[in-house]
Image: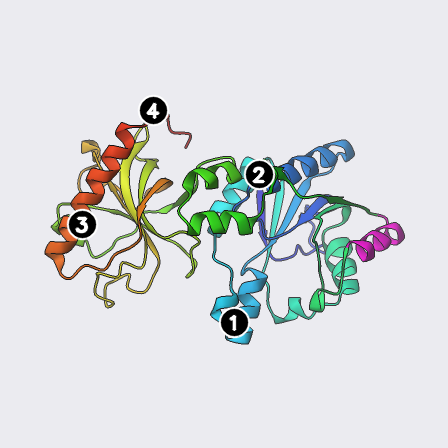
């Protein structure tokens, strides 16, 4: 999948956006509803012999408006990092992804200018697929009827996809966020069509875990408000041929000094229950790993001192081992 940050410059000879079949959205989590839409988009693109394209935004539009209003509570909890969203879009077979910065200029754009300047002039859209609640342009003034009328006039087809339901429940990013917030990881997997996971490069930390005989793999979650938090039984992919069982903390680590090297940042800290000997103590740094959060053990706790923290970590490890003992064998890595 080709990824473009910002709109293509059609004046350049190497611009590959002569035409496309396009869908537009945040696609946070790339859940089963998104996947159904992407499958339809891909099919329509193949019929027209044009590439499929997803337009998405970073930051999330609601992040932008929450910052403008200085009301952090208006920002949605983030299901996935941009990296993981792009990975899932590519896995769905999308040809191109355009990541647009949602800023003051974009927010002020009229619906008419969005259609003409972005959809037609920049992307050459010949087919546009949107959700049943799609709105666009300044003050969300544009709707499906306006887009459909413009398509007739400007020469592109517009289609709308209804909500996707599983067992009578509408699959949405909001439903995924709610399930993650409540620690219902089995329900999350049903909504996503896969276990919930976070991936990234392993970064250096304070190495306190090593002092506590519990070395960890640290991944930074690039958004300040993750939809999930707490202690989880996990599987780690990317370090060995098979998945490694472990226990992980996703959050801000309330028991640590705020002056810690990663203080204030959201981290996923993962301890493998059986560390691969061939990696050595430093072998994980810089590697790209994927961590599946399978079962929530408890919320983050603040411990009074390192001794209490070490006892708590040992219990978390025991609880994770008990969880895996009741499960089927770990799958082969697909990384």
Mark 4, Cα crowd under 10 Å, few <14 / some 14-19 / many 20+, is few
Q: Which residue is mark 1?
A: 67
Q: Earlier in the sequence, mark 2 or mark 4?
A: 2
Q: Which residue is mark 4?
A: 328
Q: Earlier in the sequence, mark 1 or mark 4?
A: 1
User: Which secondary structure, mark 4?
Assistant: loop
Alpha carbons under labels 3 and 2: distance apart:
36 Å
Assess whether mark 2 and mark 1 are in contact (beta carbons under 8 angstroms).
Answer: no
Q: Earlier in the sequence, mark 3 or mark 2?
A: 2
Alpha carbons under labels 4 and 3: distance apart:
26 Å
The answer to whether residue 94 shows anywhere in this view is: no
**Position in image of residue 177 (x %, y %):** 49, 51
Residue closer to the observer: 162 or 290: 162
Q: Which residue is mark 2?
A: 32
Q: Which residues are magenta?
A: 144-155
- The question of residue 149 being in magenta is answered with yes
Mark 1, Cα crowd under 10 Å, few <14 / some 14-19 / many 20+, is few
Q: What residue lies at 76% left-to-right and 61% top-to-bottom?
A: 142
Q: What residue lies at 72% left-to-right and 58% top-to-bottom?
A: 118
Q: Which residue is mark 3?
A: 312
Residue closer to the observer: 184 or 136: 184
User: Which secondary structure, mark 2?
Assistant: helix
């Amino acid at each position: 999948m080709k990824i473009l940050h910002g709109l293509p410059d059609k004046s350049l000879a190497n611009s590959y956006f002569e035409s496309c079949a396009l869908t537009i959205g945040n696609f946070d989590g790339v859940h089963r509803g998104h996947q159904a839409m992407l499958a339809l988009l891909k099919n329509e693109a193949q019929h027209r012999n044009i590439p499929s394209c997803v337009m998405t935004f970073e930051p999330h539009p609601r992040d932008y408006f929450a910052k403008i209003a200085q009301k952090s509570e208006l920002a949605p909890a983030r299901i996935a990092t941009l990296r993981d969203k792009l990975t899932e879009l590519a896995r769905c077979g999308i040809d191109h992804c355009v990541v647009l910065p949602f800023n003051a200029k974009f927010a002020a754009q009229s619906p008419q200018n969005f259609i003409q300047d972005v959809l037609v002039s920049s992307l050459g859209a010949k087919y546009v697929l949107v959700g049943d609640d799609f709105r666009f342009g300044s003050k969300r003034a544009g709707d499906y009827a306006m887009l459909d009328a413009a398509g007739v006039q400007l020469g592109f087809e517009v289609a709308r996809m209804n909500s996707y339901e599983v067992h009578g429940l509408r699959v949405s990013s909001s439903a995924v966020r709610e399930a993650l917030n409540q620690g219902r990881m089995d329900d999350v997997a049903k909504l996503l069509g896969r276990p919930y996971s976070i991936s990234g490069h392993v970064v250096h930390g304070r190495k306190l875990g090593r002092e506590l005989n519990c070395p960890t793999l640290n991944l930074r979650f690039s958004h300040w408000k993750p939809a999930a938090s707490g202690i989880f039984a996990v599987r780690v992919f990317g370090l060995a041929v098979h998945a490694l069982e472990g226990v992980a903390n996703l959050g801000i680590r309330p028991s640590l000094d705020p002056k810690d090297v990663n203080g204030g940042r959201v981290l996923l800290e993962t301890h493998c229950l059986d560390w691969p000997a061939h990696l050595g103590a430093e072998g994980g740094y810089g590697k790209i790993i994927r961590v599946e959060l399978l079962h929530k053990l408890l919320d983050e706790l603040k411990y009074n001192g390192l001794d209490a923290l070490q006892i708590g970590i040992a219990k978390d490890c025991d609880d994770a081992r008990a969880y895996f003992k009741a499960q089927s064998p770990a799958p082969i890595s697909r990384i």
